Structure formats: C-alpha cells, structure tokens
Amino acid sequence: MMSQWDQTFSNILGYKIRDSRGINWSAQSIVDFLESKGIPVYLAGGAVRDIITGNNAPKDIDMVARAPIVKTADILKEAMGTDSLLIYNEPLGSLRVGNSHSEYIDVGMFRDINSIIGASRLSEIHWGYSGDPYADALTTDFTINAMYWRMNEGVLDPLNRGIADCQARKLVIAADPRKAELDLRLTLRMALFACRGFVPDNYSHTFFVNRINDDVASFGVDLAGYLNELTRDSSDLKAAILHFCANNGASAETIQALEFAVNSGSVGYTSYWNNSGNSNSSITVGNKT
C-alpha cells in the first residue's frame, strides 16, 4: 500500500557511501543490488520515525533485509569487498557497510523474538532470522521505532500504532516483556526520547520509575561510555537526560552516578565506581540492538 511519505523515502535513498574499492554506492543501489539477488529490503527504525514526524533529513539510514544476516553479508562482501563490512555481528544479526566510520549504512534482518528464550542478558542472545516484521518489531524499544518502509508496499506498521504514536509524539514500549526485562538501556533511551519531545504513556512511565535505579547501577563502569554513545557525546542531551531522570523517580544515588558519568567521562567514572565500593567488573552492555 502506497503511503504519503513515499517520495521523501525515495529521496533519502540517494545517500551515498564508498566501498573499500573506492566505488560509490547509493542506498538505492544497495537496495536494488540485494533485491536483484532475491532479497527484499526495507528502510527501518529511526529514518522511518523521522520522516513520519516531519524530519525529512534523517541522520541514520538503517535497512532490514528479508534474509538471514549471513546470506546478506556474503552477498555484500562479494560485491563491495570484505573491508567494506565495517561491523559484521552474526549473533546480533546486523552489519555496517561503507569505508568510513562517518558515512555508512546499517543492515539488519527480521529477528526472531523467541531467540530470547533462556537468555539472562542481551549479550547472551544469538538472534535467529524470522522473516516476520511483527516478530522483529517486538525486539525493538518503542513503537515509534518499530516500522518499516519499502517501495510499492509503503509503511509497514506491524504493531498497528507506530504511525499514530509518531504523530501524537507518544512513547510506548514496543518490546516483548522478555526483551524489556533484559534491556537495561531501555530506561535511558526513554529519557533520551522524552528529551526530544516524546511523552511516555502511563505504562512506559511506570516502567521507567521502577527500573531506572537498577538499570543505571547495572551499567557499572560502562555507564559513561553508554551515555556518550546514546547522545553522540552531546553535553546538552546528557544534561537533559539527567534532568528528566531527576524529575521522574530516580534516586539521589542514581542522580549522583549520572552526574559523575556526565561530568567526568569514562576514565573518571571508572574511578568513581570503584571508589564507591563497587566491583571492578561491570555488566557488559553488549552490542547495539
């Protein structure tokens, strides 16, 4: 089904990267190449969210290929060269293609939510391929990020509320409860989107209040590094996240930890963490999902 945003989506497919052989590839040419090999490709995540909310120039282009990540990686590696796969994470089901860490495209697969069975933290999961947008949507963080777009199909909204929540700027947890239970990043990501003008619904806000203290503590020495990654090292965003947490149920201890993480950086925060009587070992956050 065609959508009102199709022309804007088509426009951003002009974004170009360069492979390790010096050849330029547009996002469209990557889509066309994979589809010529029988693999349907969708734009996904933040780019879809941004366009629906009126931002016609998304910063990131994420794709989902309807094939196991091993197959997609092998096809792109043969066409672009091995060195063009900046990141290839088979357990996570994702890869990053390009020849520059500032210009790249992330490609994933439709993951199987049932892969989470038996895992006690995200880094233990070896995501399987489902081929199902609904199953994949249940592995995402919020409904506003659980949508996909493909030419001639328009926007896919498997949870049947992503478009409406984008337009209402409502923040609703999309993740299957099993995924949400393991994802210690979810509360800080909720704070980030709240700082961008999205309002958590009652369930999501309650989730935040109940989890923020444990989640921040669980990051251990990795807290400062994750905040840098989450905010792209933006001082303003870090300050806004800290303010949101302070006004939405975070304890004094949690606020102190966040302040140290924001103001002292990774090395300084490690010293703070260890000097506070905590273990030198930290919980590994694992790869982005």
Image: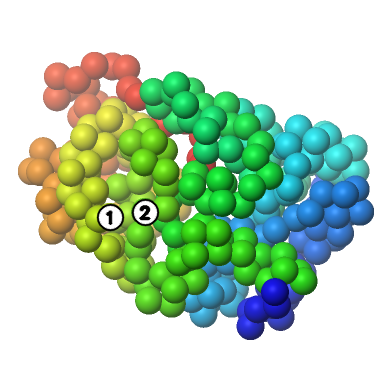
From mark 2 to mark 1, how far is it between C-alphas?
6 Å
Residue 197 seen from this side: yes
Q: Residue at x 22, y 60 (%)?
A: 202
Q: Residues within 10 Å of mark 2 (few under 14, many from 20)?
A: many
Q: Residue 184, located in which quarter of the rendered image?
A: top left
| Amino acid type, callout 2 | Ile
Q: Name the residue nearer the viewer: 82 or 40.
A: 40
Is 234 left or right of 70, judged from the image as shown?
Answer: left
Q: Residue at x 19, y 20 (%)?
A: 278
Is 139 left or right of 173, judged from the image as shown?
Answer: right
Sequence-wise first label, 2 or 1: 2
Q: Which residue has dot 1 on it?
A: 204
Is 278 left or right of 79, judged from the image as shown?
Answer: left
Q: Which residue has dot 2 on it?
A: 173
Q: Residue 74, located in which quarter of the rendered image?
A: top right
What colouring style does the render use?
rainbow
Q: Residue 4, located in which quarter of the rendered image?
A: bottom right
| Amino acid type, callout 1 | Ser
Q: Residue 173 at what x, y percent from top left?
A: 37, 54
